[in-house]
Image (tube, grey):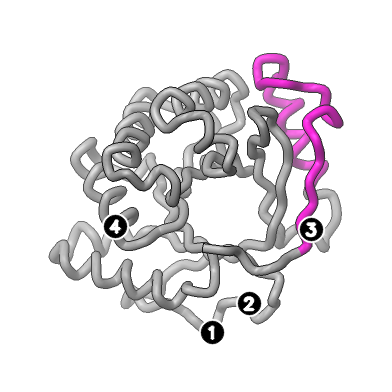
């Protein structure tokens, strides 16, 4: 889906003097993200580390994060009327998923996709809250088939072994469903350069260099 026009800023990797994450420590990487969010006006922008020609650079756009209400209804009135908003990110309703029929959650996801039809539609999965490989596989498949443009995989600082196994599973699921060209992965909260490097290598191995270079892989802070 083509994103709406927005004020997009890009800075080349040479501005930050690194060609891969191996030369960065965590504080340096955090300082780069913080530099991008220096002014109040920029707080509504989402800053992503993406790849162009296999070189990391920063890309920004306006994103709004939405949580469903207690009855799993989409608070449509909360969507910003600002025409610069390009992405809507919805927290996956895990409690509802565990208490309903599979067709009900799928219908809900389809409805969310329809209501976000003018935006890039991200579904956010908190990997810490997911209980098993079966659950993460089923949830990711539902999200992808329902039309999510990106899966935002939220972690807390550094990857656990369990989270890493979930990410490998999701990456291979994307490949097996033949949607690697249309569904991206966003890693939110990951700040350890060594682990970020590992995920870049994994994405290239499983999904290919072109998928990474096409901004399908992003890191958000």
Compared across the picture, whether 204 is left or right of 105 comes to right
Residue at image position (31%, 33%) is 172
Residue identifier under label 4: 145
Badge 3 crowding class, 10 Å Cα cut-off, few under 14, some 14 to 19, many 20 or more, is some
**In the rendered structure, which segment of residues is drawn in magenta?**
7-36
- Using the rendered image of the protein, determine whether residue 96 is visible from the camera's viewpoint: yes
For label 3, the residue is: 42
Depicted 21 relative to depicted 134: above or below: above
Q: Name the mark nearer the viewer: 4 or 2.
A: 4
**Which of the 4 image quadrants contains residue 69?**
bottom left
113 or 164, which lies in front?
113
Q: Reading the chain from its start, which is encountered first: label 2 or label 3?
A: 3
Q: Position of residue 84 (x, y in %)?
A: 71, 70
Q: Is residue 87 left or right of residue 100?
A: right
- Evaluate whether residue 65 shows in this view: no
Alpha carbon distance from label 4 to label 1: 26 Å
Residue at image mark 1: 77
The residue depicted at 61 percent of the width and 31 percent of the height is 191
Q: Residue furthest left?
A: 101
Whichever of callouts 4 and 3 sits on the residue coming sooner in the sequence is 3
Q: Is residue 30 magenta?
A: yes
Quick check: marks 4 and 1 in contact, CB under 8 Å?
no
Q: Dot 4: what SS? A: helix
């Amino acid at each position: 889906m083509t994103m709406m026009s927005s004020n997009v800023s890009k800075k080349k990797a040479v501005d930050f003097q690194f060609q891969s994450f191996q030369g960065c420590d965590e504080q340096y990487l955090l300082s780069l993200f913080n530099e991008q969010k220096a002014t109040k006006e920029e707080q509504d922008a989402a800053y992503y580390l993406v790849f162009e020609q296999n070189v990391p650079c920063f890309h920004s756009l306006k994103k709004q994060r939405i949580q469903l209400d207690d009855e799993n209804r989409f608070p449509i009135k909360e969507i910003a009327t600002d025409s610069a908003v390009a992405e809507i990110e919805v927290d996956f309703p895990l409690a509802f998923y565990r208490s309903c029929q599979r067709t009900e959650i799928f219908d809900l996801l389809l409805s969310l996709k329809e209501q976000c039809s003018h935006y890039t539609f991200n579904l956010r999965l908190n990997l810490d809250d997911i209980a098993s490989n079966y659950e993460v596989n089923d949830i990711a498949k539902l999200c992808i088939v329902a039309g999510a443009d990106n899966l935002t995989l939220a972690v807390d600082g550094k990857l656990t072994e369990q989270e890493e196994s979930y990410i490998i599973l999701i990456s291979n699921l994307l490949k097996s469903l033949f949607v690697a060209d249309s569904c991206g992965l966003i890693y939110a909260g990951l700040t350890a350069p060594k682990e970020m490097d590992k995920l870049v290598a994994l994405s290239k191995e499983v999904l290919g260099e072109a998928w990474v270079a096409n901004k399908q892989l992003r890191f958000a802070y």
